[in-house]
């Protein structure tokens, strides 16, 4: 997914992290996130993928 965007939301629905996708592989620094459950979305145009992220 190139030229898209990754967004990370906390369980309250607040956007806590956002990064543009410019290559097929990338690293996402989650060190600023506290422990807990997050919702991750990856978007490109009208396509969207969603998943959960657990930070321990």
Image (cartoon, rainbow, N blue to C red):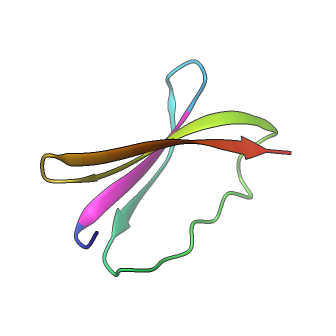
Above or below residue 23? Residue 12 is above
Q: Position of residue 3 (x, y in %)?
A: 22, 69
For this orientation, the residue located farthest to the left is 46
Report the number of discs: 0
Above or below residue 36? Residue 19 is below
Which portion, as a residue range, is magenta? 4-9
For this orientation, the residue located farthest to the right is 56
For this orientation, the residue located farthest to the top is 12
Q: Position of residue 41 (x, y in %)?
A: 41, 45
Quadrant of residue 10 within the rendered picture: top right
Horizontal relation, residue 21 to residue 12: left or right: left
Q: Is residue 6 magenta?
A: yes
Above or below residue 18? Residue 11 is above
Quadrant of residue 39 within the rendered picture: top right
Q: What is the magenta segment's predominant secondary structure?
A: strand
Quarter in which the N terminus is drawn? bottom left
Quarter in which the C terminus is drawn? top right
Quadrant of residue 52 within the rendered picture: top right
Horizontal relation, residue 18 to residue 36: left or right: left
Above or below residue 21? Residue 50 is above
Q: Residue at x 71, y 46 (%)?
A: 33
Q: Position of residue 51 (x, y in %)?
A: 51, 42
Horizontal relation, residue 34 to residue 8: left or right: right
Q: Is residue 32 magenta?
A: no
Residue closest to the eye, 6 or 54:
54
Q: Residue at x 34, y 69 (%)?
A: 21
Q: Residue at x 34, y 64 (%)?
A: 20
Q: Position of residue 27 (x, y in %)?
A: 56, 74
């Amino acid at each position: 997914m190139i030229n898209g965007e990754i967004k990370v939301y906390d369980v309250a629905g607040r956007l806590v992290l956002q990064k543009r996708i410019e290559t097929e592989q990338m690293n996402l620094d989650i060190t600023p996130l506290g422990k807990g459950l997050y919702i991750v979305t990856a978007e490109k145009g009208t396509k969207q993928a969603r998943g959960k992220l657990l930070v321990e």
